[in-house]
Amino acid sequence: MRTRTKLWLTALVLVAIVGAAVAAAPDEGPAAEHHHHHHDAAQHEGHGAKLQERFLYVSTIAQSKTDPDFITVVGADPRYADFGKIVNRVDMPNVGDELHHYGYSHDQKRLLVPGLFSNRIHVFDIKGDGRRLSLKTVTDLAKASGYAVPHGVMPMADGHAMVTMIGAATDSTQPGGIVDIDDRTGSFAEDFGPGPTRKPGEIEPKYMYDFEAMPGSNRGISTTFGPPALCAPKISPSCLGNEVAVWDLRREKVVQTADLGAHSGALMVHFVDKPGVRRAFINTPGTSAVWLADDDDRDGAFDFQQVLGPKDGLALPPDLLLSHDGKYLYVSNWFGNTVQQFDIADPFHPLLKRTVKVPHPNMLRLSRDNKRLYVTNSLLTTWDNDSAFDGPRDDHYGIWLFKVGAHGELTSAEADGSAWVSFENVQKKTTRGPAGPHLILFDPSIKLAPGEHCAEYHRSRRPLRAARTPASTRLDSAVVAPCSQDVPKDVPRLL
């Protein structure tokens, strides 16, 4: 590495890859390729890591004008009597938040829960064995930041969390961006990259949805969706944006954009978690496709190519994920009523292996040992209830569970293929009826890993500041490391 890259990933000391570091590309910051801590079940068990999730936390929209949205807590360990049962409901303090994606603080002691439509950030303390959550604070993020519609929450090791903001508090609800918040209070700290008011020539990013940093590098990719004012009211593929953005993490600057097609609306980005590999999969529901981004030549710029499309059975895929052993790509097809499993031994030519039926599947979550695939089937209140989409679906909500066999076989936990946990008639704060489950997180006994709504991006510890200051004057160091690893206080800073 060049002498200017003097900050090594702390993860190198914590995982078994001594001597396997690969030099980073010349233009990239502190980077050393590393292997993560989750290779297969045997290695996990050998190191005493916990594989069986005790509870699922599920962001749930109330489908009610009088009830608040809530986090549903579901028993997930078959050794307990509460397996497959709703054991707690944690109500938001207000009606109309529209819970969607959310995340942990870095130490996994708190949940940070945005309201898409309310711009509120709710901070919950996790109590006892993880069954109970206690509301700590509520913050209006739009008022403080100028950005609006908080989406993904990704922890950092400095007492902050990154939050992707789909839009801005403007008439057009553009542009999108990223902010840092205090992970104890949810309050706005500073922008990551440009603020909502842009300088001349400071255009990117135009759009925002998801963000993920590439392990062992100075690169990240953010995705698209579209302007909230146009996309939130109903299903409207024509509202979706076309670009994804590649970031220089140290400079907090977009250094490359890629056009994935008109109204493609890229959503999730997941990097391949293998040493020396610089590739990511991205789903574009607007064009029913999956793309592969690669930096195989290690020059810091990505090539993008479509690897799956409608001819492969994709029909508005809202989510994808990679198995922790790197063997499979899972894709949900909201319009197609299927979840597909692809062999990605050749990531440029994924091979369809299995297809299972789920009514309007949405978000996916895979257990750490790759043995349990969970599927939910609610997207947004307004999109779920769009009369142009299959009529009202209020009585078909739930969580589907599939057992994954040794050779990738997918078997429904319910013999008739029905929901493992039904959300068709659940108790809410004041009424009983259907509710829409969306994003699943595991309880804190399962440590965060890449691809689980965790940025893996860490700045050096520094005081929180509300003032907007240039990144070059405030960013001392940047590190991309496994989400469950702490960055020690004595990590050296870049010169």
Image: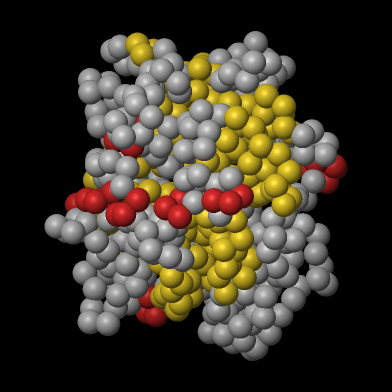
Q: Is residue 86 above or below residue 285?
A: above
Q: Quadrant of residue 429?
A: top left
Q: Is residue 327 left or right of residue 173?
A: right
Front residue of this view, candidates 479 and 353 = 353
Residue lying furthest left in this view?
A: 171
Can I make out residue 464 in this image? no
Can I make out residue 322 in this image? yes
Q: Is residue 280 above or below residue 199?
A: above
Q: Residue at x 49, y 51 (%)?
A: 288
Q: Picture coordinates of residue 306 (x, y %)?
A: 57, 63
Q: Quadrant of residue 411?
A: top right
Q: Is residue 61 above or below residue 248?
A: above
Q: Residue at x 58, y 26 (%)?
A: 400
Q: Residue at x 30, y 54 (%)?
A: 239
Q: Picture coordinates of residue 81 (x, y %)?
A: 65, 11
Q: Quadrant of residue 117?
A: top left
Q: Is residue 346 left or right of residue 299?
A: right
Q: Residue at x 58, y 18 (%)?
A: 418
Q: Is residue 233 left or right of residue 101?
A: left
